Amino acid sequence: MSIVLDTGDFTVAAGEIVALLGANGAGKTTLMETILGFRTSRTIRLFSQDVTSLPVERRVALGVGYVPERRRLFASLTVAENLEASSCLPAAQRRRRVDEMLAAFPMLGERPDARAWLLSGGQQQMLALARALMDRPRLLLLDEPTLGLAPVIVADLLARLRTTAADGTAVLLSEQRASLALGLASRGVVLSRGRVVRVASAYDLSNDPHLADLMAGA
C-alpha cells in the first residue's frame, strides 16, 4: 500500500510495521491526520486509490484505524460502550466483535462496565487500541501510543502491535523515541519540518550516527 502526500511518499505493506520518526513539531500528527482526512492535502492515495476528496468516515470504512495521541476516549462511556460506539459493523456483528476485543484484551475484559475515566493510563491506551481494531482495519495509525506509560504496559502494547501486524494489518507507528520504534519496525520514515526527508530500513536508521540531527532538521 502506498501513502502518497504532497510532503513526500512511502509505502506500508500488509503485515508491516513502519516507524514514523521526528522531533516534536516535525509534523507526525499532522501527517496522520492528513491520511485520515482531518486535514486537506493536494494528493493522497490509500489502498491503490485516490482518497483526496473522501471524508474521514469514508476512509475509515475503507479500512483505516486510528489511535490518537492521548487516547481521546468517550470518558463517560463504559469500556464496552466505547468499543461499540467506534464500530460501523451491523449490530449483531458489532456485539460479537466487542466480545472478541474483551477476550483479546484481558485487562479490559475484567472491567467491561467501568467508565473510561476510571481506568488507569495503561488500560485507557489498551482501550484506544482495541477501539481502533474493532472493524479490522487494513491500515492502523498510532500517534505516540507509548507516551506516559509504564514500561510493562509499553512491552504489552508493542507485543500486541506485533500480533496485529502478523495478522496482516499495515501499521504506521508515530514515535519520538526512535530506538523503541525502530526495534519494532522493519522500516522508518523520518519527518522534519513537515516533510519526508528519509525512508530507510530500521537497521540502517538505527545505525545512522546522524539520525538525531536528521530528525531535528539539521
Image (cartoon, rainbow, N blue to C red):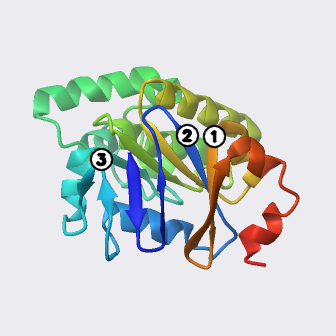
Residue 33, can we see it? yes
- The percent coordinates of residue 115 (x first, y second) are 41, 45
Task: Say which of 217 and 29 sits in front.
Answer: 217
Q: Residue at x 60, y 42 (%)?
A: 122
- Residue located 23% across and 61% down the image: 51
Label 3: few (<14), some (14–19) or many (≥20) C-alpha neighbours in 10 Å = some
* Residue, disc 2: 17
The answer to whether residue 108 is left or right of residue 153 is left
| Mark 1: few/some/many CA within 10 Å (<14, 14-19, 20+) | many
The amino acid at mark 1 is Ala
Residue at numbered disc 3: 47
How far apart, in angstroms, are the residues tagged by discs 1 and 3? 20 Å
The answer to whether residue 150 shows anywhere in this view is no
Q: Which residue is mark 1?
A: 185
Give the amino acid at mark 3. Answer: Phe
Q: CA distance from mark 2 to mark 1?
A: 5 Å
